[in-house]
Image (spheres, rainbow, N blue to C red):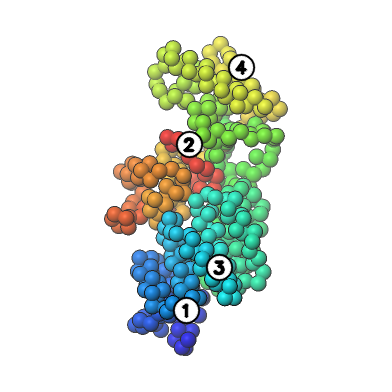
């Protein structure tokens, strides 16, 4: 490898894409094409970066397996940065195995971290934890140690382990400073701000109280009877009941909890659960059936008593009833929560991250675009969607798969 390629590679590893391009911008050999692709990706031109990296992979000979594997690694990183979550992950695993066999442990570890971060984006925490458990960060260079700790923090934040996330971010900050890469330091700072921002609200009789993730963790450990409107769960000190797939039951549970320590009128319960303004005998009959189903679902945690005008929720073990809601609630809040990271997302990537069909996401994006809350870039399959982060708006930290019809 000649001196210009070596200097360009060192500039890229230090986060200086312009310095790399000054050395190799006019070269068309395979190593220069690969480095130019990485430089364009660092500058944010992902489309051009993909073209250059693929050209480099074709330019390397069939015997240059390590170089081709590194091109696959670069293409996977570009796909992740551009939120192309449908990129074929089997190619990345094959490249990782090739790099591992040939002794390139740093790039093999980098491939594993790309897979981990993709799993985080689409909400597959168990798989992300499994991949992370198989990687020891100690022998890695500072930049990869920072990425390891960012992955640990990302999982901890979604598991609502604020203390673990804070410690991981401190280690990530130290490693990022040691690496001397400004973009990596900025990513650590952004995640730290997200950790300290409101993650939920506690609904009160006269208003609401914003809660950080640390406060949410303390509330969940308090033993209160909690109706969690962030993840569609009902919990107390001993058990958790998920109602994510039963939206009518969850709507009833939330309305009853908001009315505690009193009862909720039948008209209010019908409106919240069935989304109708007008109630007749069929709605009242259905309400009795759904309340019976909710009573059976919560039988280990609470009872539901009929009152003169409606129903009343009575916890069995805890006297305090808490309703936990997102920082801001509105239609299509789940889409806005994912877009709040400031990155450009395709509708297919949003559908994969939210666990819904692409058509559902497209309808939501059209509605949000008409109201000026999101904007699109490009056309056709290259179209990407952006939303500017709104102070105090919901984040994706406590976001599960959305309720049907959300």
Residue drawn at x 44%, y 77% as measured from the top left? 62
Residue 350 is situated, as x and y percent measured from the top left of the image, at 42, 49
Q: Rate crowding at label 1 as few (under 14), some (14 to 19) or many (20 or more) other CA atoms within 10 Å.
A: few
Residue 46 is situated, as x and y percent measured from the top left of the image, at 38, 65
Mark 1 — residue?
A: 64
Q: Marks 1 and 3, how far apart in space? A: 15 Å
Which mark is in front, 3 or 4?
A: 3
Q: Look at the numbered discs 2 and 3 and tell me whether their residues touch, using CB distance below 8 Å.
A: no
Q: Rate crowding at label 3 as few (under 14), some (14 to 19) or many (20 or more) other CA atoms within 10 Å.
A: some
Q: Nearer the viewer, residue 174 or 294?
A: 294
Q: Rate crowding at label 2 as few (under 14), some (14 to 19) or many (20 or more) other CA atoms within 10 Å.
A: some
Q: Is residue 5 left or right of residue 104?
A: left
Residue drawn at x 38%, y 74% as measured from the top left? 58
Mark 3 — residue?
A: 97
Mark 2 — residue?
A: 403
Q: In this view, does 385 lie to the left or right of 306?
A: left
Local secondary structure at mark 3: helix
Residue 377 is situated, as x and y percent measured from the top left of the image, at 32, 56
């Amino acid at each position: 490898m000649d001196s210009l390629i070596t200097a360009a590679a060192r500039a890229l590893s230090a986060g200086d894409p312009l310095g790399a391009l000054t050395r190799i911008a006019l070269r068309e050999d395979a190593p220069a094409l690969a480095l130019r692709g990485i430089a364009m990706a660092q500058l944010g031109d992902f489309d051009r970066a993909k073209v250059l990296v693929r050209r480099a992979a074709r330019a390397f000979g069939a015997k240059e397996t390590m170089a081709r594997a590194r091109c696959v690694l670069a293409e996977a990183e570009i796909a992740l940065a551009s939120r192309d979550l449908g990129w074929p992950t089997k190619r990345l695993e094959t490249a990782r195995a090739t790099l591992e066999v040939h002794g390139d442990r740093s790039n093999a570890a980098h491939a594993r971290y790309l897979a981990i971060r993709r799993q985080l984006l689409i909400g597959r925490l168990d798989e992300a934890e499994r991949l992370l458990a198989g990687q020891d960060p100690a022998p890695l260079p500072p930049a990869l140690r920072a990425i390891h700790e960012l992955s640990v923090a990302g999982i901890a934040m979604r598991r609502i382990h604020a203390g673990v996330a804070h410690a991981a971010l401190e280690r990530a900050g130290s490693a990022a400073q040691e690496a001397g890469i400004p973009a990596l330091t900025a990513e650590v700072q952004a995640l730290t701000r997200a950790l300290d921002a409101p993650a939920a609200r506690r609904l009160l009789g006269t208003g609401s109280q914003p809660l950080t993730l640390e406060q949410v963790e303390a509330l969940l450990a308090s033993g209160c009877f909690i109706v969690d409107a962030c993840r569609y769960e009902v919990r107390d000190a001993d058990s958790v009941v998920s109602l994510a797939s039963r939206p009518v039951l969850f709507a009833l549970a939330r309305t009853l909890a908001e009315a505690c320590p009193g009862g909720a009128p039948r008209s209010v319960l019908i409106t919240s659960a069935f989304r109708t303004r007008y109630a007749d005998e069929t709605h009242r009959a259905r309400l009795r059936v759904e309340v019976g189903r909710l009573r059976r679902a919560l039988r280990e945690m609470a009872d539901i008593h009929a009152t003169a005008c409606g129903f009343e929720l009575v916890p069995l073990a805890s006297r305090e009833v808490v309703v936990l809601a997102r920082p801001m609630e509105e239609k299509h809040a789940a889409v806005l929560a994912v877009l709040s990271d400031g990155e450009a997302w395709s509708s297919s990537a949003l559908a994969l991250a939210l666990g819904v069909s692409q058509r559902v996401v497209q309808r939501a994006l059209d509605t949000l675009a008409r109201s000026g809350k999101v904007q699109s870039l490009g056309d056709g399959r290259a179209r990407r969607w952006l939303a500017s982060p709104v102070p105090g708006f919901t984040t994706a930290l406590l976001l599960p798969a959305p309720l049907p019809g959300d």
